[in-house]
Image (cartoon, grey):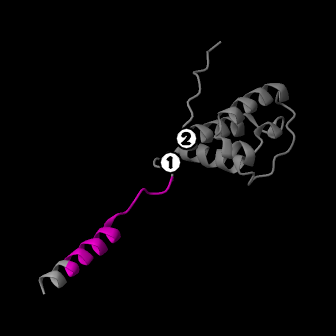
Amino acid sequence: MKNLIKILIMNLLLITGINASGGIGGGGIANIPQGQDREKYHLGKAVYNQDITLDSQTKVNPQEQEERLEYLQGSLPNTEKRRVNLPDFSGKLTEEQLQALEYFVQVRFNVKFPKKKKE
């Protein structure tokens, strides 16, 4: 009888222990910015995921954009580098879209970029 009670208590502890252990949660974004930063984030996300159509821009420097996009590409995790090729967007982004893309990559992938020098 005592052995049966011990077995029942052990089973009860095991079952509640298994159900109670939540494990590690998914890799969602903890702090999506608010206000204008939120709009900037979502614009960058749309550019990154190619959810918006990108047309050639006439008032941009494609070479400068390509350099910035190559730097962004290099800062991505390896799995993302295989999924998206950011330098392909060169010459197709407005300055606002490019800044939003940089901002999205910073927030989403926790990348720190060097401070830009003011000229």
The type of residue carrying mark 1 is Ile
The type of residue carrying mark 2 is Val
Question: Residue 19 in the image: x percent, y percent?
Answer: 34, 71
Question: Residue 10 in the image: x percent, y percent?
Answer: 23, 74
**Mark 1 Cα shell of 10 Å, populated few (<14), some (14-19), many (≥20):** few
Location of residue 13 with respect to 56 vertically, above or below: below
Residue 37 located left or right of residue 50:
left
Identity of the residue drawn at 71% across and 36% down: 73
Residue highlighted by disc 1: 32
10 in the magenta segment: yes
Location of residue 84 with respect to 73 vertically, above or below: below
Identity of the residue drawn at 24% across and 77% down: 12
Residue highlighted by disc 2: 107
Question: Residue 50 in the image: x percent, y percent?
Answer: 75, 51
Asked whether disc 1 touches disc 2, contact meaning CB atoms under 8 Å apart, the reply is yes
Range drawn in magenta: 7-27
Number of on-image labels? 2
In front of the other: 92 or 5: 5
Residue 91 located left or right of residue 26:
right
